[in-house]
Image: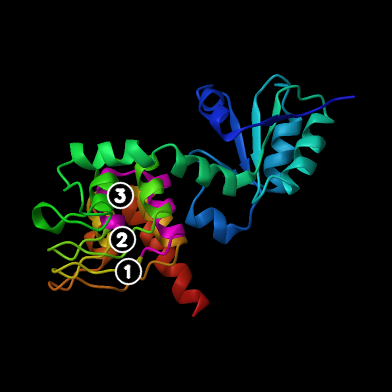
Amino acid sequence: MNYYQDIQPAEVAALRAESELLVIDIRDSGSYARAHLDGAQPVSDALLQQLLRSRQRQRPVLVYCYHGNSSRDICDFIAGFGFTRVHNLVGGWQAWEQYAAGAVSGPDLADWLARRGFPADGGIHCRIDNGMSPLMVAALAGEREVVAALLAQGADPNHVNDDDHHALWFACVHGDPELVGLLLGRGADVDNQNVNGATCAIYAASTGKLDVLKRLVEAGADLGKETTGGYDALASASTLPVLKYLRTVVAEARLAA
């Protein structure tokens, strides 16, 4: 009989270092759009059939769901076809988020705040230059675990700095789609406009960050929002792939309407 292996969140990093790893997310499409493990693919019949038709029975596979229960059935199914390195994430996405938040907490988080120039008694909503909060600084630096820890402690993802930028904007500047998804999943306003009227989608389009833009669109970004100069995301597209993608999305939206 073939078996899969349970894996703890702390063990995921080592597994993800393997280039052939296939990560399968079996949650609903909305949850996947808001946040998912970097490189994870949403489950589908086509994806499973492609995997089962392959001869790479030694290929590592990681499956996760909401709480680590439903994913067991998928793991058992895949292992039943002779795959020997199938892993189920214990506790699912919920456990992963808790692990990421707990990786930086207590004294570690206090040390991080001090090193970034925040006052020792300022709390998680204190400000430094240009009204930057700890969450904004962590997002700009792409420090995913710190962002998760701050959110877990109550940091508001919709606080804005002196330019009306919030943490989601800075995650887009850094360019990490998973970090963007994490903030969206915690309620960050996808359509927040800065002092010039620019949204995250307009910024992503103007800088050619296609993967980030896709994550924003999947989360319901309003592509009709305009800057004070009258430019929307489509008009701001700076690369051909971004332009093609936005044209397709806009055309599909018009047909649906």
Q: Position of residue 59 (x, y in %)?
A: 66, 23
Q: Secondary structure at mark 3?
A: helix
**Residue at image mark 2:** 201
Residues in magenta, as a range:
167-188
**Mark sitting earlier along the chain (3/2):** 3
Q: Amino acid under label 1?
A: Asp
| Mark identifier at residue 191 | 1
- Judge depth for marks 3 and 2 and give the one in front: 3
Q: Is residue 168 magenta?
A: yes
Q: Nearer the viewer, residue 123 or 55?
A: 123
- The quarter holding residue 161 reads bottom left
**Residue at image mark 3:** 171
- The quarter holding residue 30 reads bottom right
- Determine the main secondary structure of the stretch shown in magenta: helix
Answer yes or no: do the residues labelled 1 and 2 have beta carbons within 8 Å? yes
Q: Nearer the viewer, residue 14 or 101?
A: 101
| Mark identifier at residue 164 | none
Tell whether 8 sits left or right of 124.
Answer: right
The outermost residue toward the front is 121
Q: Position of residue 121 (x, y in %)?
A: 21, 51
Answer yes or no: do the residues labelled 3 and 2 have beta carbons within 8 Å? no
Q: Amino acid under label 3?
A: Ala
Q: Secondary structure at mark 1?
A: loop
Q: Amino acid under label 2?
A: Ala
